[in-house]
């Protein structure tokens, strides 16, 4: 099924360089539609859906950018189970940006920008699958110097720790050099333990806990705007879709046994290209990158497919681009990209993928639709 993509007004994107599509591993590309063996089936309508997570009783929970959280059922989406629309602004890249449950579904977390634009992660206790509003507490906050590049995705890793992706603070070209400044939380992947400490504890094995000049929360750095990251449900590998400046969109990878500390290069590097200054000696290049040829403008990171419905995709990393909406799959092995396939289905203005408890994938179109990826 081909979904017609509606027009979206995007801010100034800069000039895309006319570079050949490439990967960090120089993999042969197969970026042409294959015979249709997948489809996107509409399962619900939503108001600007931005994020989702697997929830209690096998349900999928969906976040709407304006501040509401609703649960997917056979009839579509439920009435809001949480509404913070009076605490956030649905403007530009701000709003409710991420939701997550801890591994036991005992706590629910929301990631949003408050009325002043401050990135905020709050926690709620969950009892019998229901949010307990009176248990709400703030886990972490970070002031934002500009209204864009907030990141905002949150997810629990296989280690039970909460990972938080924050952008470089916004504007363009990282004017405050936050991507390479490890004294700020901006431009980093954070790793914290919200189950201990007040308001959280630093995991003892975080990579920089013994360095007084680096924030202890930092797991990896050198990110511009990590728009969706995920952990491979089978292997535990971390994959990050990081939005580029003018030229390259990239996907970064770290193996499950990584001790952290990766430097993904921004703003010295944009993908494998020099952007500002010299390439850091410890730069970890992307496993995959692409230029902004055609309509593409901003990567939306996805998941390694571990569902059962589409055996041919099992083990492939699925991702999209916010502007062209095409769903693509990367064939990967041990952190190497062997090929890229266009699945021939379009999710519109793809803001996020969601992995259900059954490992099947959903696609969120910011223009208002929740899709489920299924065999044709």
Image (cartoon, rainbow, N blue to C red):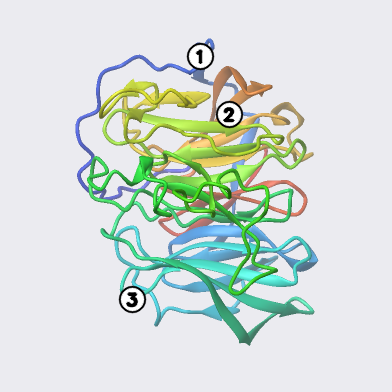
Q: Position of residue 236 (x, y in %)?
A: 72, 39
- Marks 3 and 1, the one that precedes in the sequence: 1
Q: Which residue is mark 1?
A: 29
Mark 2 surroundings: few (<14), some (14-19) or many (≥20) residues within 10 A: many
Q: Quadrant of the N terminus?
A: top right
**Position of 271 relative to 73 (above/below):** above
Residue drawn at (50%, 32%), measured in percent from left and top?
A: 251
Q: Is residue 191 left or right of residue 267?
A: right
View extreme (bottom): residue:
134
Which dot marks residue 69?
A: none
Determine the image quadrant of residue 109.
Answer: bottom right
Mark 3 surroundings: few (<14), some (14-19) or many (≥20) residues within 10 A: some
- Judging from the image, what secondary structure is the residue with disc 1 in? loop
Which dot marks residue 329?
A: 2
**Of the two numbered discs 2 and 3 in the rendering, the one whose residue sits closer to the viewer:** 3
Q: Position of residue 299 (x, y in %)?
A: 43, 38
Determine the image quadrant of residue 278.
Answer: top left
Q: Position of residue 15 (x, y in %)?
A: 20, 30
Residue drawn at (70%, 53%), measured in percent from left and top?
A: 356
Which dot marks residue 115?
A: 3
Report whether residue 135 is seen. yes
**Position of 132 relative to 35 (above/below):** below
């Amino acid at each position: 099924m081909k979904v017609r993509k509606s027009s979206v007004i995007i801010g100034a994107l800069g000039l895309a360089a006319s570079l050949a599509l490439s990967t960090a591993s120089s993999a042969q590309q197969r970026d042409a539609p294959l015979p249709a063996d997948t489809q996107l089936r509409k399962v619900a309508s939503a108001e600007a859906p931005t994020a989702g997570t697997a929830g209690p009783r096998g349900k999928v929970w969906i976040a709407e950018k304006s501040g509401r959280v609703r649960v997917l059922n056979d009839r579509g989406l439920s009435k809001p189970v949480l509404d913070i629309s009076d605490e956030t602004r649905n403007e530009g890249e701000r709003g409710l940006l991420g939701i997550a449950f801890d591994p036991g579904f005992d706590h629910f977390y929301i990631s949003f920008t408050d009325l002043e634009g401050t990135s905020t992660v709050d926690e709620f206790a969950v009892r019998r699958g229901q949010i307990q509003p009176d248990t709400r507490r703030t886990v972490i906050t970070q002031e934002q110097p500009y209204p864009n590049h907030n990141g905002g995705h949150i997810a629990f890793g296989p280690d039970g720790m909460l990972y938080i992706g924050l952008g470089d603070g916004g504007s363009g070209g990282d004017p405050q050099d936050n991507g390479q400044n490890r004294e700020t939380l901006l431009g980093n992947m954070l790793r914290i333990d919200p189950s201990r400490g007040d308001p959280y504890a630093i995991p003892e094995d975080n990579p920089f806990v013994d360095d007084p000049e680096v924030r202890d929360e930092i797991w990896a750095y050198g990110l511009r705007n990590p728009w969706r990251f995920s952990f491979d449900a089978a292997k535990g590998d971390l994959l990050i879709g990081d939005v580029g400046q003018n030229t390259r969109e990239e996907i970064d990878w770290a193996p499950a046994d990584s001790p952290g500390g990766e430097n993904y290069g921004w703003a010295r590097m944009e993908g494998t290209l020099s952007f500002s200054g010299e390439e850091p000696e410890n730069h970890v290049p992307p496993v995959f990158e692409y230029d902004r040829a055609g309509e593409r403008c901003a990567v939306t990171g996805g998941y390694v497919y571990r569902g059962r419905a589409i055996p041919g995709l099992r083990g492939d990393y699925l991702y999209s681009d916010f502007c062209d909406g095409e769903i693509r799959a990367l064939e990967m092995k041990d952190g190497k990209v062997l090929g890229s396939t266009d699945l021939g289905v379009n999710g519109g203005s793809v803001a996020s993928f969601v992995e259900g408890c059954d490992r099947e994938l959903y696609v969120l179109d910011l223009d208002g639709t929740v899709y489920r990826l299924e065999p044709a």
